[in-house]
Amino acid sequence: AQSVAQPEDQVNVAEGNPLTVKCTYSVSGNPYLFWYVQYPNRGLQFLLKYITGDNLVKGSYGFEAEFNKSQTSFHLKKPSALVSDSALYFCAVRDILMDSSYKLIFGSGTRLLVRP
Amino acid sequence: DAGVIQSPRHEVTEMGQEVTLRCKPISGHNSLFWYRQTMMRGLELLIYFNNNVPIDDSGMPEDRFSAKMPNASFSTLKIQPSEPRDSAVYFCASSFRAGTYEQYFGPGTRLTVT
């Protein structure tokens, strides 16, 4: 079965410093990987995805993610954190079912706190 | 595009009452998902539909929960009777099945059962 793991419940960084939010995956076949962000009292917002191609994927709000097949990782990164980046971040993997329908398997979420 | 629309945004009800949550997916999307989010259990997939047909409802916690999708532009999640442990934020999401699978979430319904 497909799965993702987010090993950190919380990540703390200072504004202006680079940030990394970690995600590892376990899939059979080619992985389709996603990052979502959830701001307080809001729904999840799609940030970026990896389907195929370049291992470095760029997304919204200056975020990027690096796909690493050998380490089965898909870490979210940003060169310079902003206080407004403070939110809950979810990694997800696509799970294709026998009838070609699909769902996303979400990680447990990582809370990012950027201090001024 | 208006995005995924959910109503109501907040619902407070008493234990034993029926609760109906509503969702309008993005026009043209043919997959719809209902999630529940709590501090204790995180984000849980309850049920999802493809082309208005329920595909997997294994995440529905009990028979008190039911979901319908009578047409491509409307879905409901009903809890009858409601219990305090059903208090959570319920999200609806939609996607285009033949696309690259990202889901678009609504703003959620915060349900409080007293």
Image: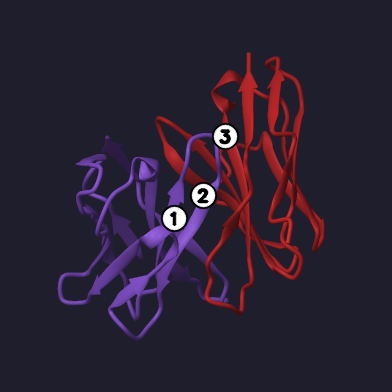
- The quarter of the picture where the C terminus of chain B appears is top right
Residue at image point 40% right, 78% down: A51
Foreground of the two, A75 or A73: A75
Residue A71 position, x and y percent, is 16, 70
Helix, strand or loop at mark 2: strand
Q: CA distance from mark 2 to mark 1?
A: 6 Å
Per the image, the residue denoted by label 3 is B89
Contact between marks 1 and 3 (CB within 8 A): the answer is: no
**Outermost residue, bottom side:** A53
Kind of residue indicated by mark 2:
Leu
Q: Quadrant of residue B27?
A: bottom right
Figure colour of chain A: purple
Per the image, the residue denoted by label 2 is A44
Task: Provide the chain ID for the residue under circle 1.
Answer: A
Per the image, the residue denoted by label 1 is A36
Residue at image point 27% right, 60% down: A77
Task: Provide the chain ID for the residue under circle 3.
Answer: B
